[in-house]
Amino acid sequence: QQTSIQTRIIPSSELQSELFSQASAIKMGPRCTFMWAQSQIVSDLHKHIFSLVSLCTSH
């Protein structure tokens, strides 16, 4: 049993498409839990930056 933790920074403009691709990956891949957390606001970009933390457990 292995658990992998990945953290990725994703612009809010790409959030919806990224969620869709991750949802597709969940159906085909190992049992995964995806947790979204708003990490910070980048002032010069005026965008919310989201970090994607995926916990995947493969047996």
Image: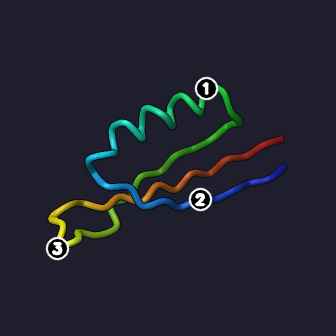
Q: Residue furthest front?
A: 45
Q: Residue furthest bottom?
A: 43
Q: Which quadrant of the figure contains the C terminus?
A: top right
Query: What is the secondary structure assignment of the residue under circle 2?
Result: strand
Q: Residue at x 84, y 49 (%)?
A: 1
Q: Residue at x 59, y 32 (%)?
A: 26
Query: What is the secondary structure assignment of the residue under circle 1?
Result: helix
Q: Quadrant of residue 40?
A: bottom left
Residue carrying label 3: 43
**Residue 27, numbered circle:** 1
Q: Residues within 10 Å of mark 2 (few under 14, many from 20)?
A: few
- Image vertical order of residue 37 relative to residue 32, above or below: below
Observer-nearest residue: 50 or 44? 44
Q: Residues within 10 Å of mark 1 (few under 14, many from 20)?
A: few
Q: CA distance from mark 1 to mark 2?
A: 18 Å
| Coordinates of residue 51 in the picture (x, y in percent) | 42, 60
Q: Residue at x 49, y 59 (%)?
A: 8
Residue carrying label 2: 6
